[in-house]
Image: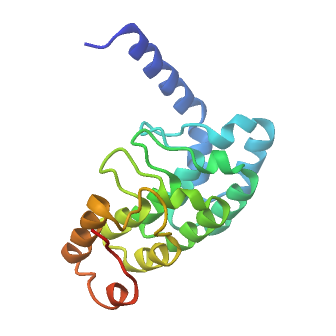
Amino acid sequence: METNSQRNDNNINNHQQQHYLHLLKTVINGDWETAKSIFDSDPSALTARLSEWQETTLHVAVNTGRFLHFVRNLVDLLPETSVRLTDGYGGSALHNAAIAGNTEAARILVAKAPSLLHLKNNNFGDAPIHSAARYGHRETFEYLLSVTKEDVDPSPFAGQDGAKLLNLLVVGDFYGNQIHHHSIVRI
């Protein structure tokens, strides 16, 4: 049964989504000039929740996988804390890039906020490198492998996280050169 608080939150979210519907369409179409004019007149639109999954403008831009100029311009406008915002599932825009196989967007995001590499989502408890492996995006995985540090706690290469990564790599038929060139798992 839905409480009054949940109903109010849903109404606020639905209202916000309706308010930003034009922005959502603009982001999906990669229309940077129109989006920039929206941001100039409403700075809160930069981090607005645009979907029922509570995705921000950056999440949606990364998901399209087509308009890197849009992602680059948006990341340039955002402070690192805004680049680190998560969606309703606890996923960052870097998780979205990993899931979509958007390697170039991943490069842009990591350059601005390297700490995203170790942020786990709520769905599977995945770091972005796990998400790239889970969804079979070899190029994105290899990029994330090259920039993800081993000496952080928790390391995505150690313990249960390392075992999960190894399992995802085997299931995804990723075994081969990258495992030989990098000490992937320390159990």
Residue 117: x and y, percent? 50, 61
- Along the line of sight, the residue nearer the viewer: 40 or 140: 140
The structure's colour scheme is rainbow
Residue 135 seen in the current view: no
Residue at position x 54%, y 37% from top?
49
Q: At 53% across and 39% down in the image, what residue appears? A: 50
The outermost residue toward the top is: 4
* Residue located farthest toward the right when viewing the structure as drawn: 40
* Percent position of residue 34, x then y: 72, 50
* Number of numbered markers: 0
Position of 33 with respect to 130 (left or right) is: right
Q: x, y percentage for residue 133?
A: 33, 70
In the displayed structure, 68 sits above or below 37; it is: below
Q: Quadrant of the N terminus?
A: top left
Give the residue at x 56% y 48%: 25
Q: Nearer the viewer, residue 111 or 115?
A: 115
Where is the C terminus found, in terms of image quarters? bottom left
Q: Is residue 170 left or right of residue 14?
A: left
Confirm whether residue 142 shows in the render. yes
Q: Is residue 109 left or right of residue 42?
A: left
In front here: 46 or 175?
175
Residue drawn at (24%, 66%) of the image: 163
Pick the front one: 99 or 112: 112
